[in-house]
Image (cartoon, coloured by chain):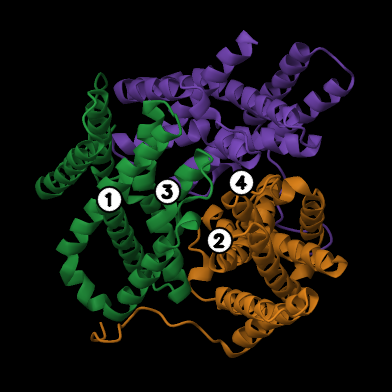
Chain colours: A purple, B orange, C green
Amino acid sequence: MELIYVLDILGTFAFAISGALVAADKKFDLFGVVIIAFVTAVGGGMLRDIMIDAHPINWIGDLNYLYTILIAVVLTFLFKSKILPLSKTMFLFDTIGLGVFTLLGLQKGLSYNLHPIVALIMGMISAVFGGVLRDVLTNKVPLIFEKEVYASACLAGGISYLILKYFNIPENIIFIVSACVIVIIRVVAVKYHLQLPKIKDDVFGKPE
Amino acid sequence: MELIYVLDILGTFAFAISGALVAADKKFDLFGVVIIAFVTAVGGGMLRDIMIDAHPINWIGDLNYLYTILIAVVLTFLFKSKILPLSKTMFLFDTIGLGVFTLLGLQKGLSYNLHPIVALIMGMISAVFGGVLRDVLTNKVPLIFEKEVYASACLAGGISYLILKYFNIPENIIFIVSACVIVIIRVVAVKYHLQLPKIKDDVFGKPE
Amino acid sequence: MELIYVLDILGTFAFAISGALVAADKKFDLFGVVIIAFVTAVGGGMLRDIMIDAHPINWIGDLNYLYTILIAVVLTFLFKSKILPLSKTMFLFDTIGLGVFTLLGLQKGLSYNLHPIVALIMGMISAVFGGVLRDVLTNKVPLIFEKEVYASACLAGGISYLILKYFNIPENIIFIVSACVIVIIRVVAVKYHLQLPKIKDDVFGKPE
């Protein structure tokens, strides 16, 4: 589906920018910025492909990902101070990337005959692991573990995909509906500062 | 062998709890806790399988690992304040996991016709790498590099396995004896605070 | 080519020593030192082989790498205080390793029919990723992202290799010339403190 490919590239672009900005903040040199942008954009899909033995892995099989990342880094390099004011646009692209990456990963998992639960995990890994690698390589505790409902949005969208698929609804509709589930949950969560519960006080124990 | 499978699941359970407790301490949200528990429990075996090209990799090939990890997280979530007093039990499970993971990894390596030294390394990676990943993802220096004789216990158990196998002793006996070697070394080491030497002062140099 | 194999082993040795020294500085125990030396020396080639599905991966297919690493660790352990004064020799070996690893990785990529750009990236990953893993495992921001022109030297050498190959110049000559490019760039860069630009102030924006 052409539209999904365009969204995939747009998501790659947004993820690469997000990586490049983090690396630039850390005062990495140009090469470091390229690496972090690269890892953020394709790291999740790469881990998925290595786990399920899908070769050639994502960025090796389609050079457009590499070109997209390089363009993202060049733009970050040239226009850094102008990208930040665009952060709403970037947030939108990033959220689109989240949705598309999750569903493409899930589809790929299913096409490799994985159990739906495993395919769902593959979708989530595709979407969130690039950001985890970005944070590990910049020596930070991965953001996703602390404050984002990021992963829950992917999970909800993936489950919605699997349920709709079970009822034999056409693939395109499933994809779009589930992507919207992811986008909406994330947008609402960010807007209203929703968070997942933490294991501070356990249910039957006393507050610490 | 049924018993070994049960011990494998018990070890997975203990490793998942250990991951979940570390993640809870870091105030990760529920999703972060699941990821860290997952990585701690299956990360070592996953790396082994990817290195030796054994597909489907551990947790993809047998969903019971996933279910075990989820149960461990739920129990941690509900009973966190009661798990800590159980730490002797957890230490026992964890040590059993260490032994079983080492020997299963070693066996798998041999079954893939790897050189015994490489198979031995695969056993050790299976046992310790989950903990290394847990520490990297929670932004700590991996514990194992600093204070545990953890790895030495695995090494000794693995070597014992290879030696006994050389003498054609039945597989079950080898497995149990070698697992006991690992468990005993670890328990004794923890009890008497034994440590491996460090490269502070070299043998022929002066103290710094 | 025999000479290249010798240089490859020499590079492995130098990378292992560099890892062992970092681990010793962090006061890791013997096991931790072995792991870090191992990861530094073979981590880049291992990631390359996993990405391109080349099995058996580097250190599994040739035990000489393991033996070289163990010798390097033993020597570090015995002579730590004497290795530091040798740092010019170590710098030379390390730089040779950089050149050889880059070009061997690039050659391997081409032999797997990868696009030249992807093969070039494989060469760079082979050369630099061991150091990145070393830094991640010792909980530091990878050195390469901040101050080294390390990666640029690999890139230049790799491009030189691809250009010379395009003109059908004999393989041995290409290899030696391109390795010299890498060695010279790195030596000159270290001597004159050259650095890549950073994204502090962007080209069209104001200084922050």
Q: CA distance from mark 1 to mark 4?
A: 45 Å
Q: CA distance from mark 2 to mark 3?
A: 20 Å
- Residue at point 74% right, 34% down? A120
Chain ID of residue with mark 4: A
Chain ID of residue with mark 2: B
* Quarter of the image with the N terminus of chain A in it: top right
Q: Is residue C204 above or below residue C97?
A: above
On residue C45, which mark appears?
3
Callout 4 secondary element: helix
Eye-nearest disc, 1 or 2: 1
Q: Residue A69: x and y, percent?
A: 43, 25
Q: Amino acid at mark 3?
A: Gly
**Quarter of the image where one finds residue C185:** top left
Q: Amino acid at mark 4?
A: Phe
> Are callouts 3 and 1 both on one chain?
yes
On residue B132, which mark appears?
2
**Whether label 3 touches label 1, CB < 8 Å:** no
* Residue at which label 1 appears: C4
On residue B153, which mark appears?
none
Camera-side residue: C4 or A72?
C4
Camera-side residue: C56 or B6?
C56
Eye-nearest disc, 4 or 2: 2
Eye-nearest disc, 3 or 4: 3
Q: CA distance from mark 1 to mark 2?
A: 34 Å
* Residue at which label 4 appears: A145
Callout 2 secondary element: helix
- Residue B205 can be seen, yes or no: yes
